[in-house]
Image: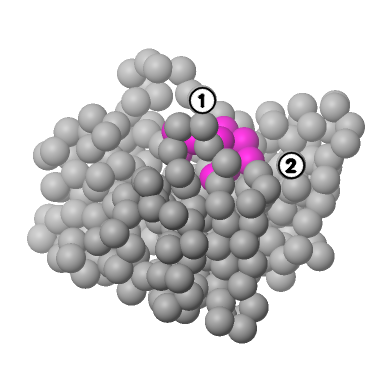
């Protein structure tokens, strides 16, 4: 349903149910319901570099290396640079995606579905060259907590998601811009340091919307991911269950192949 027909402005704290569980997106707490900060050691830095490189390779493979056209790749490269990932690593990641740098690895994006502790539905996105290997890493995470890998995709909708810093611009002005772009939803995000707005689009429109918005505002985050259907959202009220849920997410996030985790948990 498009914004011109049914558009919601949310001025309360954002609860979008998006869990980005590694420190690549830990700069603000409202975009993700939780964040797991990895220790600042060489192993953690290597893991972050690997995940970002894999993501960049996939984005280049899907959309090409022209940054003026592939705004998702442009945004990912900016994030990687802010994390001090070496320029050569990023260049090689792009070249692997476009085929300029030959490799025997055939990377692909795979989504695994399941139920986490507390009955929380999860969609786990991985970038891997071996689906069976990644599945072999994931199954023990579920088994450890007596949960299962089972279809949960029907509980989510695939959407384009952008988080933009509008600076000193008045929200009403931004709203008018988003109306003209045909976005599906917008939320003001409470943040003490920046003026953030979350934008939801049809997945097919994220490139067009992103290319327009980057001329006006700073894009903090940009991705195509999964948002739970409101009626399918759930809560955890028991502290022990919550602790197990957090441990489960950490165990999944520690798998190098995993790039994103989405859940239907309401915070």
Circle 1 residues within 10 Å: few <14, some 14–19, many ≥20: some
Return the x and y of residue 164 as percentages of the image width and height: 41, 52
Q: Work out whether residue 76 can be spotted.
A: yes
Q: Is residue 103 above or below residue 39?
A: below
Circle 2 residues within 10 Å: few <14, some 14–19, many ≥20: few
Quadrant where the N terminus is found in the figure: bottom right
- For label 2, the residue is 267
Return the x and y of residue 167 as percentages of the image width and height: 37, 46
Q: Is residue 253 above or below residue 220?
A: above
- For label 1, the residue is 37
Camera-nearest residue between 177 and 55: 177
Camera-nearest residue between 253 and 214: 214
Q: Nearer the viewer, mark 2 or mark 1?
A: 2
* Element carrying mark 2: loop
Magenta residues (range): 25-35
* Element carrying mark 1: loop
What's the image's color scheme?
A: one colour
> What's the residue at 44%, 54% (across, down)?
170
* Magenta span: chief secondary structure: loop
Q: Is residue 31 magenta?
A: yes
> What's the residue at 69%, 31% (across, down)?
246
Which quadrant of the structure image shows residue 142? top right
Camera-nearest residue between 132 and 74: 74
Return the x and y of residue 145 as percentages of the image width and height: 78, 36
Q: Is residue 55 above or below residue 4?
A: above
Q: Is residue 243 magenta?
A: no
Q: Work out whether residue 73 can be spotted.
A: no
Return the x and y of residue 146 as percentages of the image width and height: 81, 40
Left or right: residue 206 versus residue 238 is left
Q: What is the distance, in whole Å, between disc 2 and disc 1 at their CAs?
A: 18 Å
């Amino acid at each position: 349903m498009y914004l011109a027909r049914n558009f919601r402005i949310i001025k309360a704290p954002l609860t979008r149910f998006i869990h980005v569980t590694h420190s690549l997106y830990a700069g603000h707490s409202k975009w993700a319901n939780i964040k797991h900060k990895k220790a600042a050691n060489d192993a953690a830095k290597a893991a972050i570099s690997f995940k970002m490189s894999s993501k960049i390779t996939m984005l280049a493979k899907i959309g090409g290396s022209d940054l003026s056209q592939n705004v998702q790749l442009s945004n990912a490269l900016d994030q990687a640079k802010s994390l001090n990932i070496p320029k050569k690593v990023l260049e090689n990641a792009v070249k692997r995606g476009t085929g300029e740098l030959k490799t025997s690895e055939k990377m692909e994006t795979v989504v695994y579905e399941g139920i986490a502790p507390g009955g929380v539905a999860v969609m786990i996105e991985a970038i891997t060259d071996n689906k069976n290997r990644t599945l072999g890493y994931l199954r023990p995470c579920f088994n450890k907590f007596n949960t299962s890998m089972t279809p949960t995709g029907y509980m989510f909708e695939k959407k384009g998601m952008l988080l933009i810093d509008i600076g000193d611009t008045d929200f009403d002005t931004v709203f008018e811009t988003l109306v003209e772009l045909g976005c599906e939803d917008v939320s003001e995000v409470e943040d003490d340091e920046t003026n953030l707005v979350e934008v939801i689009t049809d997945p097919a429109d994220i490139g067009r919307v992103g290319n327009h918005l980057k001329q006006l505002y700073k894009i903090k985050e940009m991705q195509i991911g999964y948002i739970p259907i409101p009626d399918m959202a759930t809560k955890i009220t028991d502290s022990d269950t919550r602790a197990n849920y957090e441990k489960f997410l950490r165990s999944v996030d520690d798998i190098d192949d995993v790039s994103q985790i989405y859940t239907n948990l309401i915070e």
